[in-house]
C-alpha cells in the first residue's frame, strides 16, 4: 500500500479547501497525540508516515526569498518519498514535485521518478543524479527547472487524522530535523530536532474546528510555517547557514 499522503487527496477540490497552519512546542507532542487519537479518527490508509524531502533552490535563493518576502507568486521544488513505521522498504517510489502559488490558489505538479527511495536515502546531495531530478518538471511548466539545485533533506513524522463528522482533515508533523545538507550550499551546526512541531487543518472554513478548541492548551498558536525558512532559522536546536 503506498504511503504518499497527497495521493489520497488528489481528487479534492482546491477551491473549497482552506489550509490553517499552527505551531506548537515539539516537546508537547507526547501529550497532544493521545488527545488527538481520542477525539479524532486516524486516517484509514495514511495514519502514520515518515516523510523525507530534498528541497531545491537556485543559486540566488529565489524560493527562500519569495517565501520570506511573501511574494505573490511562489515556487517550491522538492523530491519526496515516504516510509511507514513498520518497514523502511514499504514505499520505494519517489516523486519530484513543483508547487506554484498565485495568492491563495495552488497548482501542483507531481512526477514519478525512476530513483527508488532506498537510493535517495544515501545519495549525496551534490551528486549529478540529485541535481537533474527537477528537470522532470520542465514538460509540466517549470521551464527554469535546471536552475534549481539540491540544498538539504528534511525528515519528520506525520500523523494524519479525520474529523469524525465533517470533511476536515488534520496533520501533525513533528520531530522535524535535517539529516543532511548539500555542503556546497549550507553548513549545519546541529543534528537535533527542531523545537517546533506543525499542526495543519484542511477543509471548509477558515477557523479551527470547534472539535479542536482545546488545542491551545497544548501550546498551539496560529502561525505560518515553511520548511523553506529553515536555511534562515536560528534557534537553539538547529542552525543552518549558507556555505561561503
Image (spheres, grey):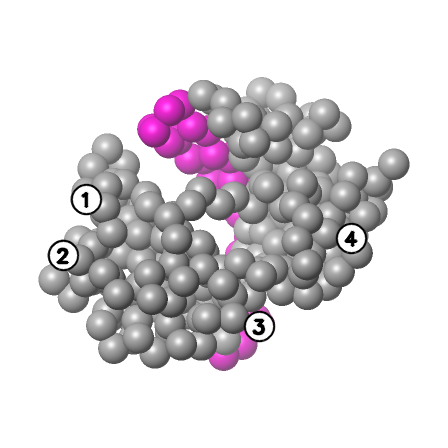
The residue labelled by disc 3 is 88
- In the image, taking residue 143 as reference, residue 37 lies left or right, namely left
The residue labelled by disc 2 is 166
In the structure shown, which secondary structural element does the residue marked by tag 2 occupy?
loop
Measured Cα–Cα span from mark 2 to mark 3: 33 Å
Q: Earlier in the sequence, mark 1 or mark 3?
A: 3
Rendered-image quadrant of the N terminus: bottom left
Seen from the viewer's position, the closer of residues 146 and 50 is: 50
Front position among marks 1 and 3: 1
User: Is any part of residue 229 visible from this angle?
Assistant: yes
Measured Cα–Cα span from mark 2 to mark 4: 42 Å
In the structure shown, which secondary structural element does the residue marked by tag 3 occupy?
loop
Label 2–label 1 contact, CB within 8 A: yes
Specify the segment rendered in magenta. Answer: 86-112
Which quadrant of the view contains residue 224? top left
The residue labelled by disc 4 is 188
- In the image, taking residue 65 as reference, residue 14 lies left or right, namely left
How busy is the neighbourhood of tag 1: few (under 14 within 10 Å), some, or many (20 plus)?
some
Measured Cα–Cα span from mark 3 to mark 4: 25 Å
Measured Cα–Cα span from mark 1 to mark 3: 34 Å
Front position among marks 2 and 3: 2
Query: Which disc number belongs to residue 204?
Result: 1
Q: Earlier in the sequence, mark 4 or mark 1?
A: 4
Amino acid at each position: 500500500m503506498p504511503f504518499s499522503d497527497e495521493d489520497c487527496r488528489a481528487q479534492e477540490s482546491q477551491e473549497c479547501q482552506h489550509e490553517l497552519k499552527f505551531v506548537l512546542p515539539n516537546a508537547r507532542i507526547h501529550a497532544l497525540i493521545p488527545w488527538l487519537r481520542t477525539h479524532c479518527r486516524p486516517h484509514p490508509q495514511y495514519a502514520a508516515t515518515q516523510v523525507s524531502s530534498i528541497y531545491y533552490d537556485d543559486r540566488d535563493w529565489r524560493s527562500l526569498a519569495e517565501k520570506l518576502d511573501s511574494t505573490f507568486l511562489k515556487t517550491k521544488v522538492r523530491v519526496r518519498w515516504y516510509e511507514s513505521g513498520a518497514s523502511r522498504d514499504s514505499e520505494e517510489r519517489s516523486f519530484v514535485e513543483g508547487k506554484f502559488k498565485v495568492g491563495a490558489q495552488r497548482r501542483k505538479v507531481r512526477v514519478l521518478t525512476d530513483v527508488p527511495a532506498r537510493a535517495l536515502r544515501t545519495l549525496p546531495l551534490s551528486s549529478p543524479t540529485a541535481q537533474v531530478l527537477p528537470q522532470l518538471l520542465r514538460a509540466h511548466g517549470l521551464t527554469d527547472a535546471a536552475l534549481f539545485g539540491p540544498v538539504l533533506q528534511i525528515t519528520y513524522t506525520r500523523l494524519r487524522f479525520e474529523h469524525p463528522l465533517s470533511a476536515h482533515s488534520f496533520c501533525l508533523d513533528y520531530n522535524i530535523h535535517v539529516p543532511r545538507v548539500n555542503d556546497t550550499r549550507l553548513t549545519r551546526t546541529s543534528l537535533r530536532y527542531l523545537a517546533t512541531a506543525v499542526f495543519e487543518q484542511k477543509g471548509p472554513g477558515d477557523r479551527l474546528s470547534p472539535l479542536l478548541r482545546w488545542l491551545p492548551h497544548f501550546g498551539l498558536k496560529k502561525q505560518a510555517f515553511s520548511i523553506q525558512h529553515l536555511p534562515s532559522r536560528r534557534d537553539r536546536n538547529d542552525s543552518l547557514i549558507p556555505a561561503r
